[in-house]
Image (cartoon, rainbow, N blue to C red):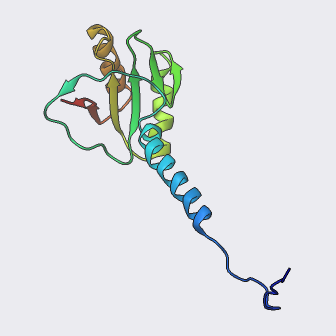
Amino acid sequence: MRRYKLDDKEFSEINITPFTDVILVVLIIFMITSPFLMTGALKVKLPQASATETTLNNNIEVYLNDKNQIYLNDQQIDISQLPADLQAEFVKKNSRDVIVKADKDAVYGSVVELFDALKNAGAEKLLVATAKK
């Protein structure tokens, strides 16, 4: 039986194929999950409209869900507490623009009451978020 002897040099190549496969899988996972991270944690069914604009970068978002509960910064607040919390957000964000994300099944009176409270708290520009048809 004859034995073959390899050179005395060490094998110095690194196989990067498995590493590349893992990186591509991680990239695909991030690409799939990133839109879900950008939309926010609160589930609100926005009304649909054919004319929509892009969102602003530095804004304050106020949510009104179908149970007429108000959320600011992913925390539920009472409408009486809204002016004080909103003033703190105006200072933090250095903006008085507010985007209202009201559920399409919310009571119309609650939406009007929210808009009135936002205007009285000092909001300059009130924007209504809609979903594209």
Q: Is residue 13 left or right of residue 71?
A: right
Quarter of the figure with the N terminus:
bottom right
Q: Is residue 26 left or right of residue 60?
A: right
Between 2 and 111, the one nearer to me in the picture? 2
Count of numbered labels shown in the rendering: 0
What residue appears at the point 13 percent right and 31 percent down from the top-left corner?
50
* For residue 20, above or below residue 54: below
Q: Is residue 27 left or right of residue 133?
A: right
User: Residue 62's x, y, as percent?
Assistant: 40, 28
Between 131 and 122, the one nearer to me in the picture? 131
What residue appears at the point 40 percent right and 33 percent down from the top-left corner?
61
What residue appears at the point 26 percent right and 10 percent down from the top-left corner?
108
What residue appears at the point 33 percent right and 21 percent down from the top-left corner?
45
- Looking at this view, name the residue that lies furthest to the front: 1
User: Residue 26's x, y, as percent?
Assistant: 55, 52
Between 101 and 8, the one nearer to me in the picture? 8
- Looking at this view, name the residue that lies furthest to the left: 50
* For residue 29, above or below residue 3: above
* For residue 6, above or below residue 38: below
User: Residue 72's x, y, as percent?
Assistant: 47, 27
Q: Is residue 96 left or right of residue 108?
A: right
Quarter of the figure with the C terminus:
top left
Q: Quadrant of residue 113?
A: top left
